[in-house]
Image: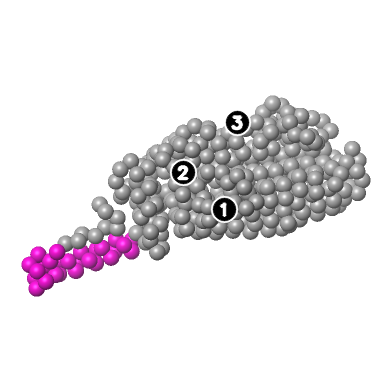
Amino acid sequence: MPIPFSPGLPTPGGSADTWGATLNSAFGATTERLALHEATYGVPLDAFDGTDDQRLQAAMAYASAQTRPPAIVLSTRTHSFTGGPYEMYNGLRLVGSLGNVEREFSATGPQCVVTVGGSALLSVPSGGVKNVFVSGIQFRAANGTVNWLTPTTNLDSGPIIQDATFQDLAWVGFATVMHARHLRVRIDRTYTNNSTDTPFKLAGSDNYYWQNGGYLSSTQLAASKFYVWFTHMSRSQFGPLYITPEKATGIRIDGSYGGFVFSGTLLDSTGRSATTACQGAAILVTGGKGLVFDKLWFFNNCVNPSSTGRSPQDKGQVHLRGSTSEVLLSGCQWAGGASQTVVTPSGTPAIYAATGVTGVKVVGPIAPAGGTKLLQQQSSGIVSKAAADDWTLSVA
């Protein structure tokens, strides 16, 4: 069936044939209804002919040529794409069939699954891309060298993904998921598992990440890697993503102009051993200003910082260094081992701030289950505390 569908029937007895004209009028109405349905609900990938790659190529070519590109709707089945990367276009909408919410990575139940081979599934055009929506799909890498999106290597001046949403997705086994520049981008309700390299490396501003949560873990990352790496991020919100930072550091921030707020994020290596728990800091900040960490949870991090190979070496579950300034940590929790096994070495500070850092404020920290109530600064005057009379602030 061609897309868009059109019967293209002649009037059987010529233009004066009343019966034929009536029939064509009915078919015309059907054609209009199909076009309206496509514009509203999308065009099925399986309406195009060929292999899955040929179908996707044809669907993207058709949709991108429309004034208002329709969504490309994948079926509840397993798809295989190996011909990428396919360049995104303004208005790209790639979605699973109605009702698919692929936040997990199990192999049972009604699911829209995409197995990706080749180097990557998608790429960002050199001029950037706007108005992208991807939802309801479980993406699986054919092997650990595949990227979901071709990484942008220059996060200072590379192309920008703008006004985009990625939600209700799973990414399983990719080298990287998204190394990109963002403006007004939302990532939410996702499950990212077993990446072999830093899955998210981002720069930009005005973004909303995991406001309704999500899960991020991997047994494949080296201690020197990161789960989420912000080279420069400002005026953005980061929500209660649950990171199990096996070996690698959970979050790295290299710069910000301000307005970068984390709320309820969990960095939790519960049940991990001294060799599989987060080896370095759970959060490493090397620069930036105007950072807020509100009600975060930390457990079993900074277990063996020397194994990261970083110099200077991480010294706290939150480690601040470089030109970092004006940082607030409010109501955060660093749990102890009264209820579960601790592999973080005794005496490891919750927060360590190196010389050169300024304006660190710690308000109302708590250490449930016997956590270590220790803040350290390399020289005096870097850190101040409030509502923390039972916590020690020392110069290390």
Q: Position of residue 191 (x, y in %)?
A: 55, 42
**Residue denoted by label 1:** 159
Q: Position of residue 6 (x, y in %)?
A: 24, 60
Classed neighbour count for the residue bearing mark 3: other residues with Cα under 10 Å, few (<14), some (14–19), many (≥20) = some
> What residue sits 38% from the left and 59% below the top?
65
Q: Secondary structure at mark 2?
A: loop
Q: Position of residue 122 (x, y in %)?
A: 48, 46
Q: Amino acid at mark 2?
A: Pro
Tell me the magenta residue range: 10-37
The overriding secondary structure of the stretch rendered in magenta is helix
Instruction: Look at the numbered discs 1 and 2 and tell me whether their residues touch, using CB distance below 8 Å.
Output: no
Q: Which mark is residue 328?
A: none
Judge whether 300 appears above or below 10 on screen: above
Q: CA distance from mark 1 to mark 2?
A: 16 Å
- Out of 121 and 299, give the one closest to the viewer: 121
- Out of 355 and 23, give the one closest to the viewer: 355
> What residue sits 35% from the left and 50% below the top?
58
Front: mark 1 or 3: 1
**Residue denoted by label 3:** 219
- Out of 363 and 112, give the one closest to the viewer: 112
Q: Amino acid at mark 1?
A: Pro
User: Residue lying furthest left in this view?
Assistant: 13
> What residue sits 42% from the left and 43% below the top?
112
Quarter occupied by the C terminus: top right
Determine the image quadrant of residue 220: top right
**Residue denoted by label 2:** 85
- Which circle's residue, 1 or 3, is located before the other in the chain? 1
- Which circle's residue, 1 or 2, is located before the other in the chain? 2
Q: How is this picture coloured? A: one colour
Q: CA distance from mark 3 to mark 2?
A: 26 Å
Q: CA distance from mark 1 to mark 3?
A: 31 Å
